Image: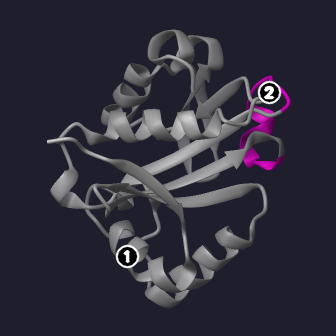
Amino acid sequence: MQKTISFTKVSFERDVKLIHSWMNEEHVHPFWQLNIPINSFRNHLQNALNDTHQTLYLGFINEVPISYWEAYWVKEDIIEGSYENKPYDQGIHLLIGNTDYLGRGFSLHLLRAMVSLQLRETRTKRIIAEPDIRNKKMIHVFEKCGFTPQKPIVLPDKTGLLMICERKQFERKWGNA
């Protein structure tokens, strides 16, 4: 059966409870550390939505919401000073929240689709990620998508593995974005 991947920008009122429930999933909260009371999470999400350097998305498979995404500009992010960034570098954070879709091979397809979406900005030559260094499953998915590990980086909430996906490498692997 053909699977359709789509993304929509997060809507606070529509999505806050769903995303909060995902943040409390056993496979999510060790890495995101946002398994906090709903009122605190409402404030967190509202602040994230107001942050103009990032765009928040829900990812869908056949119109079923299964994932949460933060696509951001490196230039205004805490990661900016962690490597020699280039103008228009973008970054990505993600989680698969819907447990019915865990371990079924959707992460790579969703990540590939999101990187393609980010690369629609023709000035962007690289997408970066910094998954928690303990999250071996996601590191593997990033590598399969075309991200290359660079170095561990210490961030306020974790030690991440800086990974970079060059546009040319991505397009060579998957075709034009």
Is disc 1 placed on a helix, strand or loop? helix
Which residue is labeled 1 in the image? 18
* Quadrant including the C terminus: top right
Task: Identify the amino acid type marked 1.
Answer: Leu
157 or 93, nearer to the observer: 93
Magenta span covers which residues?
76-87
Of the residues tagged 1 and 2, which is closer to the observer?
1
Magenta includes 92? no
- How dense is the environment of label 1, judged by Cα within 10 Å: few (below 14), some, or many (20 and up)? some
Q: Is residue 78 magenta?
A: yes
Relative to residue 115, is residue 155 drawn left or right? right
Query: Gap in Å between the C-alphas at discs 1 and 2?
Result: 34 Å
Q: In terms of image quadrants, where is residue 36? A: bottom left
94 shown above or below 47? above
Q: Is residue 17 left or right of residue 86?
A: left
Q: At which x and y percent is residue 87?
A: 85, 30
